[in-house]
Structure formats: C-alpha cells, structure tokens
Amino acid sequence: MSEGYDLKELKRRMDGAIAAFKSDIASLRTGRASANILDPVTIEAYGSRMPLNQVANITVPEPRMLTVSVWDKSMVSAVERAIRESNLGLNPIVDGQNLRIPLPELNEERRRSLVKVAHEYAEKAKVAIRHVRRDGMDGLKKAEKDGVIGQDESRSLSERVQKMTDETISEIDRLLADKEKEIMQV
C-alpha cells in the first residue's frame, strides 16, 4: 500500500453512510410506537435546523401513541408543522405545549408508502457512497498525475475502491430488503 493513498478513510466514510441509513430505517415504524419514529424530524428553531429531540421530550405513553412535550411554547406550531411535513404520515393533535400523535393502523397502503420511504433512504445512502467513490477515484487520479503512485498501483487501487463500493451498496440493498420484509409482514 502506498503512503500517497488511504483506503481506510474511504471505508470509514462508506461505513458512515451505512450507519446513517441504519438510523434512517430504524425510524420507520413497523407496528408499535417508538420515540425513534421522530428521529428524522428537524425543526427550524432559533435560526437553524435542529432535531426534534433538542426542542422537546418525546415519550410513548401507549403502544399506539406518542407525546411530544415542547419546551418553548413559541415552538409548538413549528414542531407540529415539521411533524406533519415529515413524510411519516403522522397527524399531531396540539394540546397546549404538548402534541399527541396517534399512530394510524398499518394498512396495506401505509405499508407500501413506508417501503417507498425506505427506498428513498436507500437511494440517498447509495448516492452518498457513490460520492465517496468519486472522491476516491479523483484522489487516485491526482496521486497518479502527481507521481505519488504508479499507473499499475493506481489501477489496482481503483479496482479495490470499486470492490469496496460494490460491497457497501450490496450491504445497503440487504438492509433494505430486511426492512421491507419487516414492514410488509407486521
């Protein structure tokens, strides 16, 4: 391995894309209420975008109900709007500084829409992985051009980067298939 090129950094970035994908699909519910359902929700608050759990407490009082206790009363409408627009199919009910979020029954149509969201998350992860691959290939071309590595080593390393990319994308596909099966069989 040449000192001019580091595959470990590319692997770390690809693993980061997998971790982000796992986090995204964990938020897709499969039947029972979980505070993780609201993880992808971000709110425009205090001049920046913040995760919901930084402006409110999320609890699960019943198997099919979530409650969100917003800390700042002026943020209640922003939190409600963010939850409605989150593409999760949730309709919060405002009760003062609290929001009650009943989870609808998972019917066939809702399951299909959750699978569609899972596919969107997978595509986002694959795009991130392809960006890492592109950065890696650009780095290889630059290292070869600068004379840091030879043409043969560059070709060998580019094959390894491609193999790493293919393995990471197949891992995303495997995780997606597992989640799809989990959603459809509940």
Image: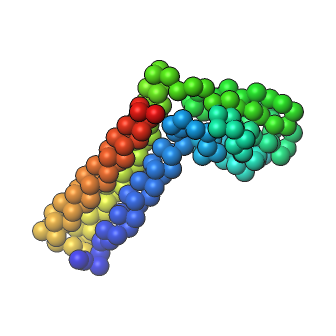
Q: Is residue 9 above or below residue 37?
A: below
Residue 23: image location, x then y, percent: 51, 50
Q: Residue at x 29, y 75 (%)?
A: 4
Residue most extreme to the top: 109
Identify the image quadrant of residue 132.
bottom left
Q: Residue at x 31, y 60 (%)?
A: 136
Q: Colour scheme of this structure image?
A: rainbow
Residue 2: image location, x then y, percent: 24, 77
Residue 57: image location, x then y, percent: 75, 47
Residue most extreme to the left: 152
Residue 123 appearing in the image: no
Q: Is residue 136 above or below residue 171?
A: below
Residue 48: image location, x then y, percent: 70, 46
Identify the image quadrant of residue 93.
top right
Q: Quadrant of the N terminus?
A: bottom left
- In the image, is 117 to the left or to the right of 181? right
Q: Residue at x 51, y 37 (%)?
A: 30
